[in-house]
Image (spheres, rainbow, N blue to C red):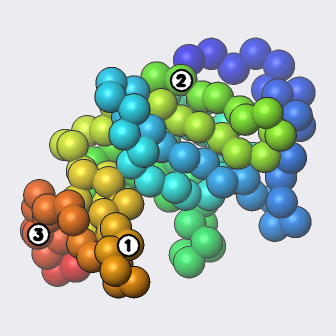
Amino acid sequence: MGGTGMARWLEEIRWNADGLVPAIAQDAENGDVLMLAWMSRESLARTLEEGEAVYWSRSRGRLWKKGEQSGHVQRVAEIRLDCDADTVLLKVQQHGGIACHTGRRFCFYKRLEDGLWESVEPVLEDPENIYEGG
């Protein structure tokens, strides 16, 4: 993807107090919003360098390459920055068609119906099979 002037483009982003920025992963083909995760300067730089999404896992406190356990990597076609420079959009090809750790196509699988969150998207693969014991 090419990364000339790396330091400058990274400094144009409005990082939060923890040095992170929210990143939306969107299917490059059909526009489906697959997931939201967080990125650090290092994870965004590595994403550009490797061409595959690398996020910052707040729960694990470390870099997390999407698909490192599941094999469901995200090949990055485009990286965009919103008008306020505080949210990144990754247009990706989702390997295996599963972005969510629950085995669904995307993470936004619950819809509000009559005051309750209802699961409205099918599980495509059992997480037990994806993550070797969940």
Q: Is residue 54 above or below residue 37?
A: above
Residue 76 picture location, percent across and down: 46, 29
Q: Residue flagged by tag 3: what amino acid is it?
A: Asp
Q: Is residue 88 above or below residue 78?
A: below
Q: Residue flagged by tag 1: what amino acid is it?
A: Leu
- In the image, 31 versus 133, the foreground residue is 31
Q: Residue flagged by tag 2: what amino acid is it?
A: Glu
Q: Earlier in the sequence, mark 2 or mark 3?
A: 2
Left or right: residue 129 compared with residue 89:
left
- Name the quadrant of the N terminus: top right
Q: Residue at x 83, y 40 (%)?
A: 84
Callout 2: few (<14), some (14-19), or many (20+) C-alpha neighbours within 10 Å?
Answer: some
Residue 85 picture location, percent across and down: 81, 39
Q: Earlier in the sequence, mark 1 or mark 3?
A: 1
Q: Is residue 12 above or below residue 14?
A: above
Q: Which residue is mark 1?
A: 112
Q: Residue at x 24, y 52 (%)?
A: 105
Residue 117 picture location, percent across and down: 34, 79
Name the secondary structure under disc 1: strand
Q: Which residue is mark 2?
A: 78
Q: Which residue is mark 3?
A: 126
Residue 40 picture location, percent across and down: 71, 53
User: Quick one: which residue is furthest to the bottom in this view?
Assistant: 116
